[in-house]
Image (tube, coloured by chain):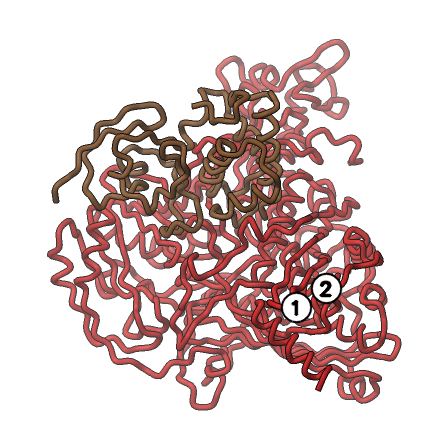
Amino acid sequence: MREIPMTVVVNGDKHELSVPPHETLIECLRDRLGLLGVKKSCDVQVCGACTVLLDDRPVSACTVLAFEARGKSLRTIEGLARGDELHPVQEAFVEHGALQCGFCTPGMIMATVALLGENPRPTADEVKHYMRGNICRCTGYKRILEAILDASRRMSGGGKGNGGAKGTDGG
Amino acid sequence: MAADRLTVVGRSVPRLDARDKVTGAARYVSDLVLPGMAHAKLWRSPVAHARIIRVETERAAAAPGVLAVLTVADLPVKRLYYGPAYRDQPILAHEVIRYAGEPVVAVVADNEAHAEAALALVDVRYDELPAATSAEEALAPGAPLIHPKLDRAGHFRDLSGLRPVPGTNICQHFAYERGDLARAFGEADLVLEEVYRYPALSHHALEPHSAVARVDVDGITVWAGTQHPFPVRKDLAEIFDLPLAAVQVVVPLVGGAFGGKCYTKIEPLAAALAAKVRKPVRLALSLEESARTITRHAVTVRLRTAVGRDGTLLARDCQVVLDTGAYADIGPRVATKTGYRAPGPYRIPCLRIDSKCVYTNNVPAGAYRGYGVPQATWAYESQMDVIAERLGIDPLALRRKNLLKRGEEYVAGDTPMDGDMAEGLEQTARAVGWTAPIARGRGRGLACAMKDGGGTHTVSTAVVRINADGSVVLLAGSVEVGQGTRTALAQIVAETLGVPFETVVVAPPDTSITPYDHGTSASRSTTVMGLAVEAAARDAREQLLGLAAKLLDTDASTLAIADGSMTHGDRTLTVAEVISGHYGLVGGEVTGVGSFVPGTWSGTLGGATVFWETGMGAAEIEVDPETGEVKVVKYVSAADVGQAINPRECAAQDEGAAMQAIGPALFESRVSERGQLLNPGLIDYRVPAFTDLPGELGSLLIENADGPGPFGAKGVGEGGTFCAAPAIGNALARAAGVRLTELPMTPERVWRALRAARRVGNP
């Protein structure tokens, strides 16, 4: 099968790839680029565990084809912290105990980064609705909600962390 | 030790795994890549019951990248059948297919896509057999006999007394009786009888079942996301006729379990495939395949209760039937425990319990967080409110009157009640505003429940190694499934040793390195493993103090370790200085060993149950009379944890459990037709989403340091699942005057009940 040549920027690094047309983005990220923080669970764009940012928009890597990322910029959980310095969303998740098994956590955090990029000061209801596509089976969501609201305060109110004051993901 | 003297225990320290989990660095079995690793995919039966005639594998074997296509006859094993209660489950279907979704053929290829593609070329010929796809059908006269013969596994002491009923599909029959039931029912002022139904559920831990196996001259190594590495090792040793020492089971982080990863699942198949192709083999199921691997039991409870006019419970007759599917898994124990727990945490002089575990041609059912308690509680806590309503007694007062008090026996010979449930329920009711005025269309409901916690006759051992630099490694077989066990056990080590929390590392379970543990289930790790860990840390501390005493020229009894140092007069030695002082500068270590062995342990409570795990729940709901939709406005859960080792994580366990239980209360269930699962995946199977989070979700921790575990701890994690359904059902009854007996309480069911009630009210 003819492969498709593509250039993609992943977590700031440029990759020249050649992918078969049926290769999914999750296969490309996990198997080709070794970004194992992108988690595979439902396969049908319901659970959000494989959420990554494609040009800052959240997508489920399980139902996006790799070549759709051609010429675009991707960000995964691996590209969020700067060295040892965690992103404010990551910090908030740690401090609020907003994780248990951790399998949904990378997708949950990436969706949060997208949310706060679009809406820096969401209400609790806005958070719930935006995050509806990210399933967590362990925490019951309460601490995730608290972490997201806290991250929002930190990022837009000059709190600590590396996210800056503009409510973007700092990328 | 008084709580105010604790320095690490009782603090909400950050989880040891938090940083890895927020940066994507955390590694699960499904992330494991071994050099030269092959991938397996399974051909699963489309029918519920059939006799296999012929399997054609040649075309699949010739497909690109395919290394092997295997039926059960091709597996290089000494024993084909396994299972924790009965050896009734073949590694691949053997002669007979017993459920739709059962693996029949395995394809191993160089990558997943090739293995998947070759599945379409497998041709299985079979003759369909009559199927029994509900417990009712399987119990009916003339039902197909799903397992004509049973072979007891003999793995666990409590399962040695299993009572199958020969010639039927009943693989376990638990019965208990006390008191003069006929007389009590005859003399009662009120007798109520109702049948309550709880549906089968999918665990849907987000990481599906995964295993990677490697077989070489030294034996078998399996990396698996299992809650029971040591029982899995035992099954593998028997299946391959190897000594335990030649089988190594390693468990990295697990992406959720909830009981679905208890006991042996896909590990033998992964190992058999690896042995056959002489390469490491990865068998990673999809989420839909996990739903075809194990389920929660659908349970029917017929509950008949005799009550005095003042609300005193006089007698209860509990008839429980569990659909355990095509293979028993741990169903027989779930049936025993569901029966045992079916009367509820009350003082009831006369009891009759009859619990049946029934084979059907459905997906096997096994352990699920709560182990039968949520099903039993749905029945008895719904009925408690009916009693309250009929007698005009406040539901809280009715429960207070009948709840077992601290020190009272549930069943003669078992551990007496070790907590104050009435007080806990009172607090829960207060937290939901039980007596406050309430808006129209809203209602509040309560429920409480208990389960014998800690596991039945289970052993844990642990090793604490203090290295020459003062850092500490804990070897403990408890599996980190998300509950925070590594963090809690590290806190117990740090507190007991007197060293900083940051110096303790917890190694992942590896059966060749980590000492034996029964498994991570039954809310047992903090209490039972915790005691083993505490004993190991004490052993290490005493050795260390002995060495320090020699170096400081004093008696060990005058020394203590605080913040990693020992002081005598004006001389202070760190842990590292003691070890290097004793061994010279070459290194060395201090190794402490501890264990918990039931029977030899004499806690203040004694008896059979390690502790009683109690759960209290209170809901405020709003019902939409037009649509029948029930919205949980507020939910409060309470857990008696004895002493919280890590309060934040205890509360998080309880909240997560409560939220999980709101699913089957309102919308979650497996839907099957003639044994075909219609909603295997997350598109059709609705689990709680972010938008289902109640406006307020709270957890109360009750701490009286009265548990048998370290520092007075009791287990937590299951209790939050007990009460949500009956608390919401009771709230619905108080809000709208309708009571459902079958879960989930979907808008359609509620709407129909509302319509029926209106008809009765306005003929």
Instruction: Please tell me which residue lies in front, B759 or B391.
Output: B759
Q: Is residue B340 left or right of residue B171?
A: right
Q: Position of residue B614 (x, y in %)?
A: 71, 56
Q: Position of residue B732 (x, y in %)?
A: 70, 67
Residue type at the position of mark 1: Pro
Which chain is home to disc 2? Answer: B
At mark 1, the secondary structure is loop
Which chain is home to disc 1? Answer: B
Write down the colour of chain B.
red
| Above or below B667: residue B309 | below
User: Which residue is labeled 1 in the image?
Assistant: B625
At mark 2, the secondary structure is loop
In the current view of this chain or complex, which residue is farthest to the top? Answer: B570
User: Which residue is labeled 2 in the image?
Assistant: B441
Q: Residues within 10 Å of mark 2 (few under 14, many from 20)?
A: some
The residue depicted at 34 percent of the width and 59 percent of the height is B239
In the current view of this chain or complex, which residue is farthest to the right? Answer: B310
Distance from disc 2 to disc 1, alpha carbons, whole Å, reads: 8 Å
Residue type at the position of mark 2: Gly
Q: Is residue B421 left or right of residue B750?
A: right
Write down the colour of chain A.
brown
- Decide which of tag 2 and tag 1 comes sooner along the chain: 2
Do the residues indicated by labels 2 and 1 lie within the same chain of the protein? yes
Q: Residues within 10 Å of mark 1 (few under 14, many from 20)?
A: some
- Which quadrant of the view contains residue A141? top right
